[in-house]
Each structure stands twice: as C-alpha cells, then as structure tokens.
Image (cartoon, rainbow, N blue to C red):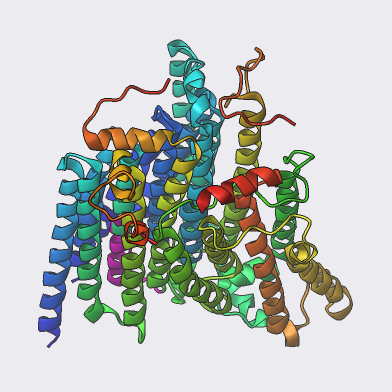
C-alpha cells in the first residue's frame, strides 16, 4: 500500500499548504477562496479516513455553504480591510506566538504518535446493538439512538442560532425579508443554473435522507444539499426569501425538534426512558424524526445564510437594480 | 490496476496543486476562483479514482455532492463582486486589460 | 508510518496554524477563518481516532469502516460549527455596517461609513 | 477481455490526467483571466470526463456507473455556468459600450433583444 501513502502524503501537503495560505494571506478574500478549496480537500481526507458520512457533511457544509458565507462576508468587509492590516502585532510577539503554537502542535503530534494500541473502540458495541434500531448505517444509529440527546440538543441549538442572526437586524427592518443574498442583477447563466440544478439537488438530498438509514448519508447531509438548492434559487432572484414573521416558515423551523422531543417524551411511557424507542417501532419512529429534522435543518441552514432581515426599501432597491 | 489508479489520483492532485500557485499570485480574485474551481474538478476526479481503487463504497455519491455544489464558490464570487461597489471585479478587469490600476486604498 | 498517523500529524499542525492565525491576525473575519481551521484540525483528530478504533471491526472481519461514535460526533460538530460561523459572520458584517471597521479592537471614533449605510 | 478493459482504463485515465496537466499549465501560463478561464473550462471537463470513462469498466457496484456518469454531467453543467458567470464578472467595462445599441452604430437600435443575453 505504498502508493496509497503517496496519495495521502500529497493530500496532507496540499491541506497544510492551503491552511498556511488561509492563515498568512494578506487579503481576506483570497483567504476565503482558499478556504473553499480547503473544504474540498478535507472531503477527500475524510474518504481516506473511511468516514464517508462525514465526507458528505464536509462536502455539503464545509466547502459549499461555508464558502458562500465567507466569500459573501469577505466581499462586504473588503472596504475596511486595509486599516486592519496595520494593527498586526509586532514581529517579536508574532515569533513568540508562533513558537508557542508550534509547541502546542508538537504536543498534539506527540499525542497522535503515542495513541494506545490497540485503540479503544466502541465500534463492536455499536455493531452489536445496531439491529435493535432496525437501521443499517451505524453512524445514523449512533446519532439517533446511542447519542440521541446530543443530536436533539444540536437540532435545538440551531434555532437559537438563527434567532441570534435575526436579532441583529435593525428595529425598522424587523419582520422583513433577510437581506444577505443580493438578487442577481443581469445575465441568464445564474437563473438558468438555478432552474436546472435544483431538481437534481432535491433528488440527491431526499435520496441522502432516505438512504441514510442503511447507507452513508443522513438528515444533515441531505438538509445541507436541500438548503444549498434553496439558496441558489434565492440568489438567482427566482424566489424572495420568506419574511421572518412568516408563521408557516417559523413552524417548519421548529417541527423537527418538536417531533424529536415529542417522540422522545413518548419513549418515557412506551420504552421506559426519555428518547428510548419501543423496539418494534424503532425504525419508523427514527425515520419520522429524520424527516422532521430534515425539514427544520434545511430551513435553518438556508435562513442562516440569508442573514438578518434588511430594511424593505433596501431590498426593493436591489430588486429594481436587477431588472 | 489499484496502484495505477492511486498513482493517477496522486498525479492529478499534484497537478491541480500546482494550479494553486494561481491562488497565491492572483492577481485578481477571479483568478483565485479559477484555481479553486480547477482544484474542485481535479479533487472530484482524484476522489473517484481513490474510491474505485480502494473499494470504499458510496464514493461516487460524495463526488456527486461535490459536483452539485461545485458552482457555489463562483456563484458567491459573482454575487459578492457585484455587492462591494465592484471593487474586486474592477480589480480583475484591470488585470484583463493588462493595465496596472492602483489599489483603492 | 501509516496514512492515518500522517493525517493525525496534519491535524496537529492545523490546530497550531489556526491558533497562530487566531491570535496574530487582526481582522475579525481572519480570526473566524482561523477558528474554523482549529475546528477542522480537532475534527480530523476525531477522524483519526475513529479510523484507528475501526481496527477491531477489521479484526472481527465485519468491514473496514471506522468507529461510528467519533464520526457521529464530528457530524454534529460540523453542523454546529457552521451555525456558529454564520452567527459570527453576521455579527461582524453588522459591526462593519454600523461602525465602519472590521476588527473588534480600537475605540477611536469611526470614520464616515463609505457605503452610506443608514445607522439605526 | 479483462486485459482489454484494463488497457482501456489505463489509456482513458492517462488521457484525462494529461488534460488536467494541460489545464493547469494553461491556468499558470496564459496571460489574462479570460484565456485562463478558457484553459480551465475546456480542460477540466474533458479531463474529468475521460477519468470517469476510464473508471466505468472498473466499478463493481451494480449501478455504480450511473453515479459516475451523473458526477460528470453535473460537473459539465456547473462548469459551463461557472465559465459564463466568471467571464461576465471579469469582462472589462468598456466592452459593455459596444454591446448597448445606443453606443454602437453597427447594431440596429430597433433590435435591443439581440444584444441582451436573456
């Protein structure tokens, strides 16, 4: 397997080179472009680490959505950048920080080299208990059964995150439409893409959720793809983002966590513990939670990228500029 | 055959890595985006080669995701470029003409 | 040296690089990028541990996957990291719109906003 | 038969890798953004296409070839769109003036639709 080691070495060198560029680049925009490429390389690294589920999440979130977020922010912040660069700490301080960070990295590297062998693992325990859930994908099994509280809290914490983003709007803008995604102004390439790509994307997203029970995939990966398609449609100006006061949209935002909590609470009666599933119905219940969570996570991810509500006149001005 | 496929993956990764010099040199942000885009396609190719060579299942689905979202970086680039008073777009346009326009700051 | 160990060393280097960027880069967006670098390094460490933990599966002859527990943790972590990044970026853009600067430090009166953005 | 398929794979993947090399060289050596874009979009789509073509005989999964071809088709779609978008973003502003009917005498003013690309 020496040729595999060659590939791994090439990957590691590329990842480190890009990380160096992200850290050292002078302009934030160039660093953000580097981060898009970096996310893509990490996807390949995750495949090399035999973690296809994680690779899918990284592909959808890490390089797709995060790239959109960071590039948009870098473009908005570019006018203020030159002043920042003057505030860099002095050379001596930078060298000191560099030495300390290198020491930390060396410590972590030592930990990696001294990891116990054979490695402690819960893989066998997961494999032993997986049949009880009716699932075939051990990662989904861990997310939905063994560490269900973790997943529940995560799906809940996304909602306060969105509230945090919304609360950054001005008072006049409250109740309006999110304003980060500037509708596209001219040309037909982007609207064409936004018409052709989403059917495929929605198909792939739903497939990921559905197949996630038994094969790599799952709600987070599927939701990230669905959210990406929604954002594409909004960026192309084909659909406006929903108003933040929209009742139906707010309901969709919380339906997943509500579903999760409801089924979890029912587990106290039916299976004797919070978030426990009665064995006969484990798989249908888990699928129900997955579908609810997919809807909510899609809505949250899309609206996180769409940003806080903007004043209405500004939005209309941008729409007019488009035509 | 496995060794050949892995070698091809390493070769493609290496070439697109050379293309990353464009990220370093720029000069415009559009050129950096081009390099990221080339890395995207090359990364998908390397991923497929790796997946088939090592027999990891579902790799083509990861490639599908990457291909599906490959355009997003450039979409962010063009929408963002129109936003900040066309600073980065003008920067790249100046490069296209071979003119040396000074930085706005 | 195996590929897994190599990725582990890479993860350690990423954490170090990210920490350096977090401390030494003055721009807040750069700090967010650096923080994401640290995060990806930590996630990769989890991935390395998951891959090593998958060894028992290979010994038992039931596949070549990694330990699913750390992998599931990383998936939740990635989603939460994205949400945190989105909040941080939104805060930063708001800061820049209202005070015309992209850093968290400095108390001098802000220069007039270049984009004519209306203050609340 | 298996030898012939293996040979096919080797030839196609090698050709694909050469296209990636050509695309990289073009990206590095071409003088301005629009020509670099040309190098990128031509080379990487053909490169990926040839790699996919070469991998088709090697897939063992029953419907693995559908996934591989879908990857290539999606890459073609996004590659074509990205080419358009980036080219539009880097187009020098003065090119616009020759495109608008009022500023250019060679375009008849009563045919504005021909000049807008919608």
* Residue A47, position as x, y percentages in the image: 40, 62
Q: Is D102 displayed left or right of A36 in the figure?
A: left
- Most frequent secondary structure within the magenta stretch: helix
Farthest residue, direction right: A269
Q: Quadrant of residue B105?
A: top left
Q: Is B60 displayed left or right of A270 in the figure?
A: left
* Residue C63, position as x, y percentages in the image: 44, 74
Give yes or no for residue B45 being in the magenta stretch: yes
Pick the residue in front: B1 or A159. A159
Q: How many marks?
A: 0
Give yes or no for residue A85 being in the magenta stretch: no
**Residue C45 can be seen in this image:** no
Seen at 32% across and 50% down, the residue is D101
Seen at 29% across and 79% down, the residue is D59
In the rendered image, which quarter contains the N terminus of chain A? bottom left
Q: Which residues are magenta?
A: B42-57
* Residue A29, position as x, y percentages in the image: 43, 36
**Residue D23 can be seen in this image:** yes
Q: Quadrant of residue A273?
A: bottom right
Pick the residue in front: D62 or A32. A32
Pick the residue in front: C107 or C82. C107
Pick the residue in front: C80 or A252. A252
* Residue A314, position as x, y percentages in the image: 64, 43
**Position above or below: D104 against A144:** above
């Amino acid at each position: 397997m020496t040729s595999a080691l060659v590939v791994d070495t090439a990957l590691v060198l590329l990842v480190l080179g890009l990380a160096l560029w992200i850290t050292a680049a002078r302009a934030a925009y160039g660093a953000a472009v580097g981060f898009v490429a970096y996310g893509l390389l990490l996807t390949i690294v995750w495949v090399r680490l035999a973690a296809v589920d994680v690779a899918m999440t990284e592909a959808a979130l890490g390089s797709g959505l995060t790239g959109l977020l960071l590039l948009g922010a870098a473009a908005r912040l570019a006018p203020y950048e030159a002043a920042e660069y003057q505030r860099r700490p002095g050379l001596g301080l930078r060298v000191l920080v560099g030495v300390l960070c290198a020491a930390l990295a060396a410590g972590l590297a030592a930990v990696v080299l001294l990891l116990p062998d054979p490695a402690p693992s819960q893989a066998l325990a997961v494999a032993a208990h997986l049949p009880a859930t009716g699932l075939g994908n051990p990662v989904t099994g861990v997310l939905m059964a063994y560490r269900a509280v973790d997943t529940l809290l995560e799906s809940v914490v996304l909602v306060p995150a969105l509230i945090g983003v919304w609360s950054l709007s001005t008072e006049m803008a409250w109740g309006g439409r999110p304003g980060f995604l500037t509708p596209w102004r001219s040309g037909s390439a982007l609207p064409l893409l936004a018409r052709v790509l989403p059917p495929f994307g929605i198909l792939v997203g739903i497939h990921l959720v559905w197949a996630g029970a038994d094969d790599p995939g799952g709600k987070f990966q599927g939701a990230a793809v669905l959210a990406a398609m929604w954002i594409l449609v909004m960026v192309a100006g084909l659909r406006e983002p929903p108003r933040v006061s929209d009742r139906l949209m707010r309901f969709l935002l919380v339906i997943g966590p509500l579903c999760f909590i409801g089924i979890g609470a029912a587990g106290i009666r039916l299976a004797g513990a919070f978030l426990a599933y009665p064995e006969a119905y484990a798989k249908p219940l888990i699928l129900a939670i997955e579908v609810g969570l997919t809807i909510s996570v899609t809505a949250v991810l899309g609206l996180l990228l769409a940003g806080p509500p903007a004043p209405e006149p500004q939005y209309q001005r941008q729409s007019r500029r488009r035509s | 055959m496995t060794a050949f496929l892995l070698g091809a993956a390493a070769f493609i990764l290496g070439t697109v890595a050379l293309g990353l010099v464009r990220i370093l040199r720029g000069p415009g942000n559009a050129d950096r985006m081009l390099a990221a885009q080339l890395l995207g396609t090359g990364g998908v190719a390397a991923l497929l080669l790796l997946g088939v060579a090592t027999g990891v299942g579902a790799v083509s689905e990861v490639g599908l995701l990457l291909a599906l979202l490959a355009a997003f970086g450039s979409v962010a680039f063009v929408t963002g470029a129109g936003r900040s008073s066309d600073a980065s777009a003008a920067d790249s346009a100046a490069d296209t003409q071979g003119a040396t326009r000074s930085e706005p700051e | 040296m195996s590929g897994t160990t190599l990725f582990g060393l890479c993860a350690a280097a990423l954490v170090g690089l990210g920490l350096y960027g977090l401390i030494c880069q003055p721009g807040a967006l750069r700090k967010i990028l650096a923080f994401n670098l640290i995060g990806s390094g930590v996630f990769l460490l989890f991935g390395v541990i998951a891959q090593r933990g998958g060894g028992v599966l290979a010994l038992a002859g039931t596949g070549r996957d990694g330990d699913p527990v750390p992998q599931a943790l990383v998936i939740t972590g990635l989603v939460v990291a994205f949400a945190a990044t989105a909040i941080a970026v939104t805060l930063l853009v708001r800061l820049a719109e209202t005070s015309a600067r992209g850093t968290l430090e400095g108390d001098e009166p802000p220069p007039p906003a270049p984009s004519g953005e209306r203050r609340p | 038969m298996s030898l012939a398929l293996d040979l096919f794979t080797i030839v196609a993947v090698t050709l694909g890798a050469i296209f990636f090399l050509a695309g990289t060289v073009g990206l590095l050596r071409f003088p301005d953004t629009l020509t670099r874009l040309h190098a990128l979009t031509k080379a990487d789509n053909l490169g990926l296409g040839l790699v996919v073509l070469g991998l088709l005989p090697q897939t063992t999964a029953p419907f693995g070839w559908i996934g591989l071809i879908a990857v290539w088709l999606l890459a073609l779609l996004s590659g074509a769109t990205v080419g358009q978008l980036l080219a539009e973003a880097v187009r020098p502003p003065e090119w616009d003036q020759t495109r608008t009917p009022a500023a250019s005498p060679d375009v008849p003013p009563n045919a504005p639709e021909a000049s807008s690309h919608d």
